[in-house]
Image (spheres, rainbow, N blue to C red):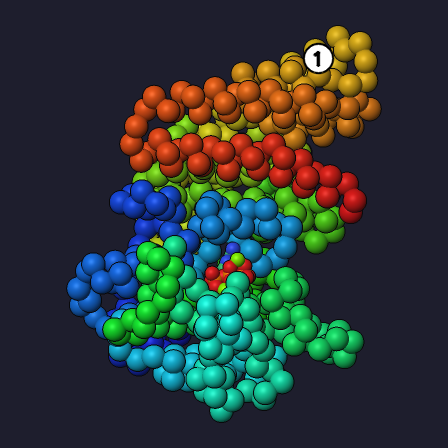
Amino acid sequence: MTSREIRSQFLEFFTSKSHAIVPSAPMVVKDDPTLMFTNAGMNQFKEYFLGNKAVKESRISDTQKCLRVSGKHNDLEEVGMDTYHHTMFEMLGNWSFGDYFKKEAIEWAWELLTEVYKIDTSILYVTIFEGDASEDLARDTEAYELWKQFVPEDRIINGNKKDNFWEMGEQGPCGPCSEIHVDIRSAEEKAKVSGASLVNQDHPQVVEIWNLVFMQFNRKANGSLEKLPSQHVDTGMGFERLCMVLQNKQSNYDTDVFTPLIREIEAVTNSKYGKDEKIDIAIRVISDHVRAVAFSIADGQLPSNTGAGYVIRRILRRAIRYGFTFLDTKEPFIYKLVATLSKQMGDAFPELISEKNLITNVIKEEENSFLRTLDQGLVLLENIIESADSKTISGKKAFELYDTFGFPIDLTALILRERGYELDQAGFEKELQKQKDRSRAATKVATGDWEVLFDDAEEEFVGYDTLETTIKISRYRKV
Ligand code: ATP
Ligand code: MG
Ligand code: MG
Ligand code: MG
């Protein structure tokens, strides 16, 4: 089954259960100061759940473009390292606003997975909320009894508050959730350890695919819970993970959502996927990031130096660096992938076709300018190495290179290591902290939500651009 068919069968199934199909909301959020990017299907319905907006349709279904690179959901560090977390992904969902509740949500999820998609029931596990004594929250026996109609008891797993109790925020709607996981390990691996013990353990072949949230409480400002006057269902299923299962693959990147992009990366960079782990990670990162960037630009969000645009620029630069470092790409090439992407996904997301030229040109321009930065930085770094009087390069010099010329610190560290030099990492951190203090003092002068948001984004992104990526580079070394 192709990914196209998988997507349309989902929507057809919920149409047959009287759901109205709505378009995906934009991935880049413009009207909510607390959120930069859509990170779940329910975001666009938040006002319904809060009771601030009247519900027109009580049953809705869609596929939502999501991006998880900031705030509560930041999967950036996982991307490329594992095979099932993306920055940008599609979340298939169905909702009930005060209409059906647990019974239908569970029965339909099971019907879709096992009768329409025909997933072998023996690879499925489900989780239910185990309860929490500290809040006087009961175990979700209702969900347990409903699952018991289909699933043997040893494959219904109790889950804690972290995995099985969803909250919109510090206040507002919340409730237990029940998740569906797949065990796609080989028979040999299955014989060694039971899949039940691997659920929610970040095992690459025992993976969560669908989250069914049952909103039945409201958390009040004082922290206490009250029953909601009407109950809602909010579900989210990872489309790329579903494709992995239905196409009998072990990795999202081996499904037809990604293979056309990967083949194109191999062709334009003259590399091969599946032979060397470092190269594979780079190819996965690039095929992931081009989607995030292309969808953002299609939403009208260009790379820039502030807010969401800054986040997008950092994601694109990250892809450029992975290419530069591991695929030896010294010329722009990511823009060439846009044609393949819009061909692959343009029918579901026509903005990729209508904005194709803009996306291509913007990415090419960004690549050109960042590659120039990298070139200049390499020359400057060479000068620093030549004039060094010890094998340790000062954090201050590395910071100058980073701050004034935009040269990534992890690349500095990597090159130095390769040349037998060391970076004074602590010295670098000190300079970075000084700069943060300066910019914090500067933003205090300005007022308004946007400054706050930008400050947060910058902190997060400066964070990964220095420390986290350095950790990653050292992880490559071990392979
Ligand atoms: P995980 O535990 O795997 O990180 P999650 O519990 O954070 O997933 P939810 O917030 O429950 O995910 O989102 C609903 C569904 O969206 C998940 O069951 C999963 O299939 C999918 N999903 C979540 N994060 C990602 C991601 N980064 N890339 C691809 N799919 C994802
Ligand atoms: Mg997660
Ligand atoms: Mg989870
Ligand atoms: Mg989940």
The residue closer to the viewer here, 259 or 33, is 33
The amino acid pointed to by label 1 is: Ile
Q: In this rendering, does residue 180 appear at all?
A: no
Q: Which residue is drawn at 56% across and 72% down?
A: 159
**Residue lying at 54% horizontally and 50% vertically, measured from the top left:** 75
Q: Where is residue 232 in the image (x, y as percent from the top left)?
A: 31, 72
Q: Which of 287 and 141 is in front in this view?
A: 141
Which residue matches tag 1? 384
Q: Which element is circle 1 on?
A: helix
Could you say where residue 20 lies in the image, as x and y percent from the top left?
A: 25, 71
User: Which percent across, then down, holds residue 254?
Assistant: 60, 61
Identify whether 29 is placed above or below 119. Answer: above
Q: Which of 5 and 414 is in front in this view?
A: 414
Q: Inspect this view and state whether residue 104 appears.
A: yes
Q: In this view, does 419 lie above or below 169?
A: above
Q: What's the residue at 73%, 39% (across, down)? A: 474
The quadrant where residue 152 appears: bottom right
Mark 1 surroundings within 10 Å by alpha-carbon count, few (fewer than 14), some (14 through 19), many (20 or more): some
Using residue 68 as the reference point, say whether residue 196 is left or right of it. right
Q: Where is residue 366 in the image (x, y as percent from the top left)?
A: 46, 29
The relative height of residue 377 versus residue 302 in the rendered view (above or below) is: above
Point out the residue furthest to the bottom here.
Answer: 149
Instruction: Judge from the rendering whether residue 161 lies leftward or rightward of residue 107; answer left or right.
Output: right
Residue 28: name its quadrant: top left
Q: Quadrant of residue 323?
A: top right
